[in-house]
Amino acid sequence: MTSVLRIVYKGYDALGSVLIALSVRNTKEKVPIPPIGDRKLLLQSASDIAEMIRNRKVTSEEVVRVFIGRIQEVNTHVNGLVDERFEIAIDEARKVDRMIQSGEFDEIELKDKFPLLGVPFTIKDSFCVAGLRHTAGLYYRKDIIAPQDADAVKLLKRVGAIPIGVTNVPELCMWWESVNTVYGRSRNPYDTRHITGGSSGGEAAVQGAAGSAFGIGSDIAGSIRMPSFFCGIFGHKPTSGMISNWGQQPEVKGRLAEFLTTGPMVRHAKDLRLIFDVLIGENVQKMNKIPEKNQLRILFMEDDGGSPLASPVDPEMKDALRKAIQHLEKTYGVKAQKANIAKLYNSLEIWAQAMSGAGAVPFCEELALKQGKINPFWEVVKFCFRMSPHTFPALILGIIEKIAYAGNQLPRHKQMIEMGFTLAKEIQVGSVERRRCTSVSQLPSPAPRHYVPMFRPADFSYCAIFNVLGVPVSQVPLGLGSKGLPLGVQIVGGMHSDHITISIAEELERAFGGWVQPTPIQNKSSSPKLKSVEKASPAPEKPTSTPTPTPPATTPPVSSS
């Protein structure tokens, strides 16, 4: 049966490659995004920028303006930012500068109370940011304005960070390419012909292009890690239940809230720890201490056990994994062991059955703003005539969901749920030796071309299984491959071992260089003047108040690209 599924998968993948080559008008030549030039602030970590602001080496207003300028410069290339608050952010930066100049707090007090004072950040469009559109990529939410901030935004504002905008996502965040019928498709800063990943794909594109000092994403099936990997940055999926998810769409409750996590997306590994600790607050006391180097046990997995539904691991990815393992063995003085976790073969099914049995609002109801539900079969027909406001992946997910819910009554559903619980126990107790083991795993390949995910729908399972298990995972860039696209690995730890996986990410950054500028460095200055503050995305005018939209009985034609 496995051999048959593998043959079918390869045939479907090959068919997809042919269809995409025939029907998609991809740019023949790679068009690089504008270089950073001599704008050194864009190359600094959020931690260092915060210190420079506290020490009065640079003003918050200067920092905010240079990042706004960078977004205005690159967003037409990557389509990452979809709504902004530039003028408000500049005004908030001026208030920060006045507070520092007043001498109300000395440098030590500022670092203690406001560790991110004056530092600009972006966040994915699934989070509420007061005054900005809150669409989550859904056409029927295009006129909704967030009345208040999500908990994550409140926490970051409390320590002085300044939000400057929200970033693109796939429709209701349920796909691994960031595209929707509200804002369109996000593009990879290393090669705009390739995807950014999803669902935090717009955020990853902005971060990879140095468009903000740091970003925030959320992750229910690899939504932080896949985009971070594809766009060459660091991302961290925290231990489940450590950070509030309030203020996100779709809203999650019950067991589903255990699978969804909020976390940082950054260009510099040391920012992971700082931002993560801000977000978890008092839960920092639950974190396991970083052990001595020789006490760390390292396991590694080259694939997911050979599932026929997912792509095999690219040779370049395997080579990157081996180099990372060799470095960790040398640095930590330990011998890495190859993990043999047979249940990972069923990763996709375990995740899918866990999600379908988690008590979530049916996806077809979410697509209709919980005011009834859409008929995904009819919407597919409308899509063929460019009459549906939904993306094709969302409609297919709606169809799959109906099948999955029917399958919840079958013995296989209970079997997969139990397998997930057993696997979690194995990871925690057996493999990790009381939370002191870190395993290294990976995704199958660098960022594919646009549309390819429709023909490789299950590749996200390399990440999704860890959401069911609840363990922390840090995504680490390991330079660029032969096609100029980022390579990377996932660092997986036991429950509450976030500081351990982040510390290993920092070590791998020292060894392999971490984030790489998407465009080669040029000696000639390319710093543009800051444009007048304007919209960074082709969004419609904001309504004066927050409406309660109703799905129209007759849907207008909407582009699905």
Image (cartoon, grey):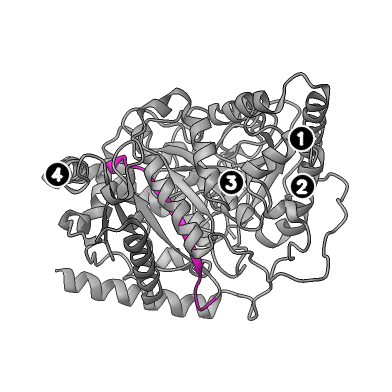
Q: Position of residue 176 (x, y in %)?
A: 46, 55
Q: Position of residue 428 (x, y in %)?
A: 21, 41
Q: CA distance from mark 4 to mark 1?
A: 53 Å
Residue at which label 3 appears: 555
Mark 3: secondary structure: loop
Q: Which mark is residue 410?
A: 4
Does label 3 or label 4 sit earlier along the sequence?
4
Residue at which label 1 appears: 89
Does label 2 or label 3 sit earlier along the sequence?
2
Q: Which mark is residue 68?
A: 2
Q: CA distance from mark 3 to mark 1?
A: 37 Å
Q: Which mark is residue 222?
A: none
Q: CA distance from mark 4 to mark 2?
A: 53 Å
Mark 4: secondary structure: loop
Q: Which residue type carries mark 4?
A: Leu
Q: CA distance from mark 3 to mark 4?
A: 36 Å
Q: Are marks 2 and 3 in contact (CB under 8 Å)?
A: no
Disc 4 packing (10 Å; few <14; some 14–19; many ≥20)? few
Whether residue 471 appears in magenta in the rendering, the answer is yes
Does label 1 or label 2 sit earlier along the sequence?
2
Q: Quadrant of residue 46?
A: top right
